[in-house]
Image (cartoon, rainbow, N blue to C red):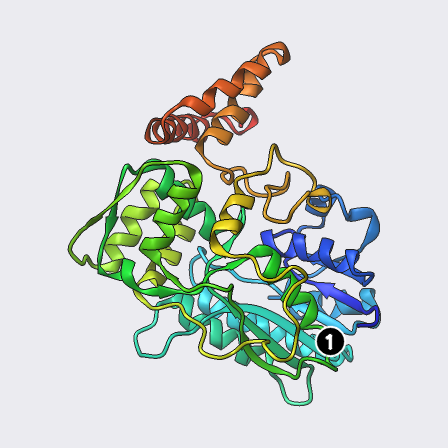
């Protein structure tokens, strides 16, 4: 694929920040778009990109961003408001605004990363909104749209993986309601990035919808137990009765370190099978070099990083970046980070002993510390 001028929205997010690094690594020119340009300076790739201010909800901002960016071959749409009040309608409006601005700017292609949309009525806000955003990005005479759908993305810093980590670390006995048997096609973050880059190639990938997945199908319950096994933890699943998903989402939000509204919205989607509905990019794009990453290998890679590093200098995209959320990385990592703030540097090597804290205890300690910080003046956090 020849070098292209690409624009990445959501560049400060988990996937967007890693995609920027992947595009640069493949020789593409990258424009990064954000509503908060001051945050862009935190990313290791900032000197290698062109930053623009873009608020997809504001038509003037979107038009101005494309004007500043200049000619763009491919625009990546990675914007979402999940976890915020009224995000479904806001997401649809923002996508339409972005698509019209891209059309006026002569953009040839939009690549959108959404998710699988199961068949059936009564889908959660999160699931129903995915297809609606893809439709909103498709405007008459506008850029062609490639919609990649993915289920759980395995990688340190990914919201879904951090929820998986929290449950696996904190519960000796893992509750297994009936929906824990729903089939699931997870995918590693490295494979997601590979397919996102490949989707820019109009000679290879026609416009349309493609579900991307890893090489193995599992279930929610088995994925949790696989995480525990790879982590070296003893865990067991305990069957429990079916419970209303509204209640499950609210309770889950209390037991994972992910922001409560975000966790509650994501949990609503667990009540559905999450398997690919088509062959994705098979036959259009060759497998990643070395083949796709399996579930166990993806989890192992996600747990193998040692300390946060700039996103463009990660030894592997599964590792935690210094720009990933503070709540990511697991309980022990968070406790060590907080402890290092209040201990002299000479004592920092001893903080490695915190790894010996049992998972459930680390979860209680971390929750307590986070609660105290939340109640403290902002300057102390």
For residue 95, what is the image quadrant?
bottom right
Identify whether 364 is placed above or below 130: above
Which residue occupies the foreground of this view, 80 or 3?
A: 3
Q: Residue furthest bottom?
A: 140
Relative to 190, is 143 above or below?
below
Q: Quadrant of the N terminus?
A: bottom right
User: How many residues crowd mark 1 within 10 Å: few (<14), some (14–19), many (20+)?
Assistant: some
* Picture coordinates of residue 108, whole percent (x, y): 74, 80
Q: In the image as oriented, which residue stretches furthest toward the front?
A: 290
Residue 292 visible, this angle: yes
| Residue pictured at 44% horizontal, 32% vertical | 331
Above-or-below relation of 325 to 1: above
Disc 1 target residue: 201
- Identity of the residue drawn at 33% across and 61% down: 270
Look at the numbered disc 1 and give the secondary structure of its residue: loop
Residue 259 shows in the view: no
Where residue 381 appears, x then y in whole percent? 53, 28
Question: Residue 191 appears in which quarter of the rendering?
Answer: bottom right
Q: Nearer the viewer, residue 251 or 280?
A: 280
């Amino acid at each position: 694929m020849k070098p292209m001028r690409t624009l990445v929205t959501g560049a400060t997010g988990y996937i967007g920040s890693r995609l920027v690094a992947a595009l640069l690594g493949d020789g593409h020119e990258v424009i990064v778009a954000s509503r908060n340009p001051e945050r862009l300076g935190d990313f290791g790739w900032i000197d290698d990109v062109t930053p623009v201010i873009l608020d997809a909800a504001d038509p003037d901002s979107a038009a101005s961003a494309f004007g500043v960016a200049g000619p763009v071959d491919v625009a990546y749409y990675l914007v979402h408001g999940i976890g915020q009040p009224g995000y479904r309608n806001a997401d649809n409006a923002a996508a339409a605004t972005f698509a019209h601005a891209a059309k006026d700017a002569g953009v040839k292609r939009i690549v959108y990363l959404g998710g699988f949309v199961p068949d059936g009525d009564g889908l959660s806000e999160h699931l129903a909104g995915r297809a609606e955003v893809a439709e909103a990005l498709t405007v008459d005479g506008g850029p062609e749209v490639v919609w990649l759908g993915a289920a759980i993305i395995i990688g340190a810093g990914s919201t879904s993986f951090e929820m998986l980590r929290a449950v696996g670390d904190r519960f000796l006995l893992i509750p297994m309601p009936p929906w824990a048997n729903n089939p699931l096609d997870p995918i590693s973050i490295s494979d997601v990035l590979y397919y996102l880059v490949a989707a820019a190639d109009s000679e290879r990938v026609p416009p349309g919808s493609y579900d991307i997945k890893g090489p193995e199908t599992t279930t929610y319950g088995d994925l949790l137990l696989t995480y525990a096994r790879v982590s070296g933890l003893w865990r067991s699943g305990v069957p429990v009765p079916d419970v209303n998903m509204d209640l499950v989402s609210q309770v889950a939000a209390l037991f994972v370190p992910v922001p409560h509204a975000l966790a509650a919205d994501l949990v609503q989607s667990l009540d559905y099978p999450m398997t690919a509905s088509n062959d994705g990019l098979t036959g259009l794009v060759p497998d990643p070099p070395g083949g796709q990453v399996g579930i166990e290998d993806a989890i192992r890679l996600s747990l193998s990083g040692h300390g946060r590093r700039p996103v463009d200098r990660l030894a592997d995209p599964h590792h935690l970046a210094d720009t990933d959320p503070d709540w990511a990385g697991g309980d022990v990592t968070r406790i060590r980070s907080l402890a290092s703030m209040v201990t002299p540097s000479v004592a920092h090597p001893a903080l490695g002993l915190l790894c010996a804290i049992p998972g459930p205890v680390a979860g209680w300690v971390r929750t307590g510390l986070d609660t105290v910080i939340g109640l403290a003046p902002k300057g102390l956090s």
